[in-house]
Amino acid sequence: MLPKKENLEEKERTKHTVDSLYKDYVDDLFSYALGFGFDKQAAMDAIHDVFCRVCIREKDVQEIQNPKFYLLRALRNQLIDTYKLKRNYSEVLTGEITDELPYRIKITVEDEMIAAEEQAEVSQKVDEILSVLTERQREIIYLRYMQECSYEEIAEIMQISVPACRKLLYRTLLKLKHNNTLVLFYLLLSINVG
């Protein structure tokens, strides 16, 4: 058994690590949760639940190899649980409920980069582009291009196989291409990221 001083130092290190994780990723997690259509309070509640679980499992915190991936996955699972609880009891009994959440991407462009009028125009174009996509396709676009997750991470988060992940992204981009919006999508993406 570790002496008390070492236990306190380890707890302090864990607390510092959790604080750092929160500061580094809370904005990304918040955007991800809002994309599922949850209100701001529900999104923050889910994020806080995830971090409470991280604190409870303090020994595991030091072993997290890719914190962003870990937190996105944990948040998605938390949101699915929240979504299931909000669904009608009868849907749960009949087995009609699925693990799919509606995912909506709302890209905003910083005011410093574009005047307010141009920002509204860009948002409208992005909404038009993304309106042809399914919820899963919007989610994979967000994870791949906005969060820069690997195929393996996306597959884990969306609970699909890596080949299915690659296929979904390919079909999503193909759909954008067939709608003559792929080039515009990449252009708007570069404006948002740049």
Image (spheres, grey):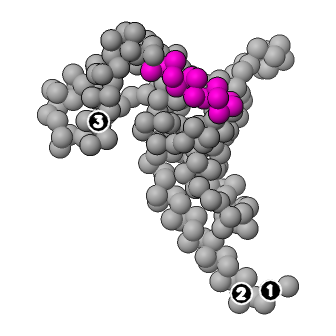
Name the kind of residue labelled 3 in the image. Answer: Ser
Name the kind of residue labelled 1 in the image. Answer: Leu
Q: Which mark is residue 190?
A: 3
Residue that mark 1 sits on = 2
Residue 29 x, y percent position in the rendering = 51, 45
Could you tell me how far apart the alpha carbons at marks 2 and 1 are, in whole angstroms? 6 Å
Q: Secondary structure at mark 3?
A: helix
Q: Quadrant of the N terminus?
A: bottom right
Q: Nearer the viewer, mark 1 or mark 3?
A: 3
Name the kind of residue labelled 2 in the image. Answer: Glu
**Viewer-proximal residue, 87 or 139?**
139
Q: Secondary structure at mark 1?
A: loop
Could you tell me how far apart the alpha carbons at marks 1 and 3 are, in whole angstroms? 51 Å
Residue 45 found in image quarter: top right
| Left-right relation of 58 to 145 | right
Question: What residue is shown at x 54% (from left), y 51% (from top)?
Answer: 68
Q: Earlier in the sequence, mark 1 or mark 3?
A: 1
Q: Is residue 187 visible?
A: yes
